[in-house]
Image: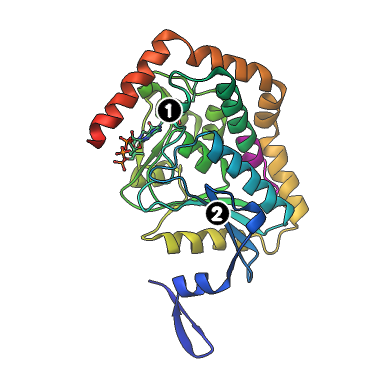
Amino acid sequence: MQSALINGKKLCCSMLLKNCFRPLSAASGKLTNVEINDKTGVAVLTMNRLPVNGLNLDLLRDLLQSIQEIEKNKCRGLILTSASNTIFSAGLDITEMYKPDQERLKQFWNALQDVWLALYGSAVPTAAAINGHSPAGGCLLASSCEYRVMLPKYTIGLNETQLGIVAPKWFMSTFRNVLPRRIAEQALVQGKMFTSDEALKVGLVDELVASKEEALIKCEKFFASFSKTDPIARYLTKKQLRYNDMKELQDEKVQDVENFVSFVNQPTVQKSLGFYLESLKKKAK
Ligand SMILES: CCCC/C=C\CC(=O)SCCNC(=O)CCNC(=O)[C@H](O)C(C)(C)COP(=O)(O)OP(=O)(O)OC[C@H]1O[C@@H](n2cnc3c(N)ncnc32)[C@H](O)[C@@H]1OP(=O)(O)O
């Protein structure tokens, strides 16, 4: 464990982290928690819908509110992480898509679009401390950040084709923003889940570390690398680079919801989702 000397006392990183964090209460919903490091101005946004941080409508709404509050508070960085010790996020909550209430299904997809637009386009620098498995929607959130630090022995990837579903264009653009095109294409068509080591090798994550504490420190170090960079120039550069991906969704937001609703309601897709949910439940027994 890393440590530092403060006032002649040797403090471990967890003590350091605990000592200077204060909650951002306006941004802490039921399912997310935001703490700001008073010394660095960095916000840690923790998903807290246990056991697996399945992204349902409520968690997505809390996430959006938290991201917006972090932006409003002009934080120096946003670290996305999980309250679970083994799961970053299990991705979209499949129960939102299986035998869905049609109105809620639209709201659900709209909320996911808004979270992606807010996170991918955030003016605040973003990083993910991936402290557990991160399939599909979990991988989307992590890949939307600018930097990723992962713990060993977990998996990450866009596994949609394995569920019999197709990731929308903006999921794919997010992946392609991180991975070389050929690797992204192969992984997307296979629905490949990368181990932590594999993810590091292909560049899906930037660093591997042994603990969540170390991951948070590495993310803070990434933000510190901008200390000599003008924040507005930094943001405008990021915005330009991500502009086409975001514009594509902004222009087609309504159509994208309609496509999603129509796709999910197809009997074959419902059947695949049903089987998949069942297999998850059997595994849990
Ligand atoms: C057109 C649509 C485009 C977009 C499409 C999709 C994007 C997505 O995100 S789809 C979701 C994809 N996610 C997955 O494939 C992950 C599935 N889950 C797992 O692989 C494992 O659960 C996981 C590795 C995350 C965790 O493993 P464990 O720690 O062993 O936990 P359990 O498997 O026992 O799960 C506990 C509990 O949670 C339920 N669960 C898990 N994932 C989901 C999910 N994504 N949605 C809904 N529910 C989920 C699981 O069934 C267990 O439930 P109970 O049996 O009731 O306890």
Label of residue 151 in the image: none
> Could you tell me which quadrant the C terminus lies in?
top left
N-terminal label among 2 and 1: 2
Give the magenta-colored segment's residue range.
Answer: 116-123
Q: Which residue is drawn at 70% across and 34% down?
A: 243
Local packing at callout 2 (Cα closer than 10 Å; few below 14, some 14-19, many 20+) is: many
| Vertical relation: 191 (above or below) 45 | above
Local packing at callout 1 (Cα closer than 10 Å; few below 14, some 14-19, many 20+) is: some
Classified by dominant secondary structure, the portion drawn in magenta counts as: helix
Give how far across and how far down residue 143 sits, in percent. 52, 40
Identified by mark 1, the residue type is: Ile
| Vertical relation: 14 (above or below) 100 | below
Q: Name the residue under label 1.
A: 94
- Which of the pair 265/39 is nearer the observer? 265
Q: Which residue is drawn at 38% across and 27% down?
A: 191
Confirm whether the magenta stretch covers residue 117: yes
Colour convention of the picture: rainbow
